[in-house]
Amino acid sequence: MAITTSIEITNITAKKLLDGKEHVITAINFDVTATDGTYTAQDSGVEYLDFDKDNFIEWADTPAFKAQVVEWTKPQSDELLAVCVAQVTELAKEEDETLEFTFTE
């Protein structure tokens, strides 16, 4: 079965005002999940952002900005997703079996 993954933003920490810019995001907390429908693995992370006045992206309640926030988590979320996928893959292996045989002396 295929493994699906997701990233959920759980909290965003921001400065109200920094160097003339409003709503400057400093940290993004997130959860990552991998599931095959039977087995699920989940982990959490936080990505800290450095303020760059020249490349600042204004806060907006839009799909494009939300996608950008998820993109900012990628350095860490990609690694955590890989671990979760590996865990689900391992859980899905059918390694245990019951063996029966007849023994007579």
Image: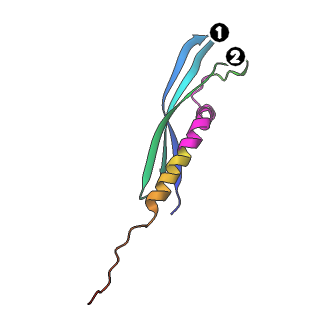
* The C terminus: image quadrant: bottom left
Of 62 and 83, nearer the camera is 83
Q: Residue visible at 50% across and 34% down?
A: 45
Q: Quadrant of residue 100?
A: bottom left
Q: Amino acid at mark 1?
A: Gly
Relative to 92, residue 102 above or below: below
Q: Are marks 1 and 2 in contact (CB under 8 Å)?
A: yes
Classified by dominant secondary structure, the portion drawn in magenta counts as helix
Residue 55 in picture, x, y percent from top left:
71, 22
Q: Residue visible at 43% across and 67% down?
A: 94
Q: Quadrant of residue 39?
A: bottom left
The disc at residue 20 is 1
Is 72 part of what is drawn in magenta?
A: yes
Residue 99 in picture, x, y percent from top left:
35, 77
- Range of residues picked out in magenta: 59-80
Mark 2 = which residue?
53
Q: Could you tell whether 37 is left or right of 17 in the image?
A: left
Relative to 98, residue 85 above or below: above
Q: Amino acid at mark 2?
A: Lys
Mark 2 falls on what kind of element? helix
Relative to 48, residue 82 above or below: below
Front label number (1 vs 2) = 2
Distance of label 1 from label 2 (alpha carbons): 9 Å
Residue 34 in picture, x, y percent from top left:
49, 50
Residue situated furthest top in the rendering: 20
Residue 71 in picture, x, y percent from top left:
62, 36
Do we see residue 13 in this rendering? yes
Is 68 part of what is drawn in magenta?
A: yes
